[in-house]
Amino acid sequence: SIVARAASATLYENWTDVSGFLMADPRCIDDPMPIPEITYRELRELSYMGAEVLHEETVFPVRQKSIPLYIKNTNDMNARGTLIMEKFEEEEENKNIRFITGISGKKHYSIITIAKSRMNDEVGYIRRALEVFERFGISIEHIPSSIDSFSVVVASSSIDGNLHELISALNEAIAPDTISISNDISLIAIVGRKLAANIGIAGKIFTSLGENNINIRMIEQGADEINIIIGVDDKDFKNAIRVLYNLSEVEE
């Protein structure tokens, strides 16, 4: 990858033991569809949420110069593989591209919900709360919010052993009305560069999950509209992946 960047290559091929990226984890989906083309942004979203094919240090040098990266399988040279680029120009007129590029997720998160009446009137309230998490060395995954409350999503392992001290520090720093904690949460990312162009996609996702008795504990969508992240109970993780994967097949 570094040599490709130094040489300003027109293409970097990475030959490995898999035939590119798959739409979902094969531990959850039997024989998931391969992803023939994916953008670097989508790759970043899926990789962060658990999809593991390339190490980030492999991607960074070629992405710096917008060099396309092609993943190919050493053991199956005829497999199409996955082409990774910054943008695919021909897609503007192509209506047959899946609106979901891939689905990935991770288990064992906790949601700490902090509520305070008229919280929106207190300048710096959320900042003061986040400073407490920083002081405890806790990395924050997501911060969904409403007028009088906000939630902090963290890896459960990061608060094991220090939860009582954390709650005490939050009470002292921001004096909330209530603090509640939900454990055993899974985060699932639905990623696709065509999500923003398809009307009603979020509704279809939530309806499909509801019809399969999967309770959504958290919803968040990125500002660039290439991903929707949902939180479900750990016990529903695999089933939620299956439901979302089946939805992507129907919409193909």
Image (spheres, rainbow, N blue to C red):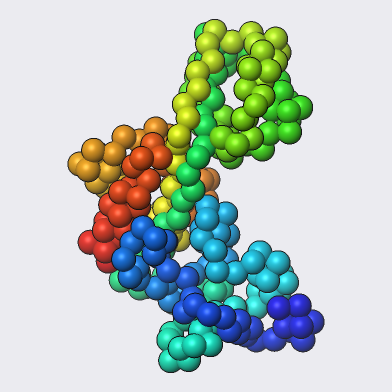
The reply, left or right, for residue 246 in relation to residue 77 is left
Q: Residue furthest front?
A: 161
The reply, left or right, for residue 32 in relation to residue 105 is left
The reply, left or right, for residue 185 in relation to residue 235 is right
Q: Position of residue 232 (x, y in %)?
A: 39, 38
Vertical arrangement, residue 166 with respect to residue 233, above or below: above
Residue at image coords 42%, 69% = 22
Residue at image coords 20%, 41% = 211
Residue 216, quarter of picture? top left
Residue at image coords 44%, 47% = 188
Vertical arrangement, residue 192 with respect to residue 135, above or below: below
Vertical arrangement, residue 136 with respect to residue 47, above or below: above
Quarter holding the N terminus is bottom right
- Residue 110 shows in the view: yes
Q: Residue furthest bottom?
A: 78
- Residue 99 shows in the view: no
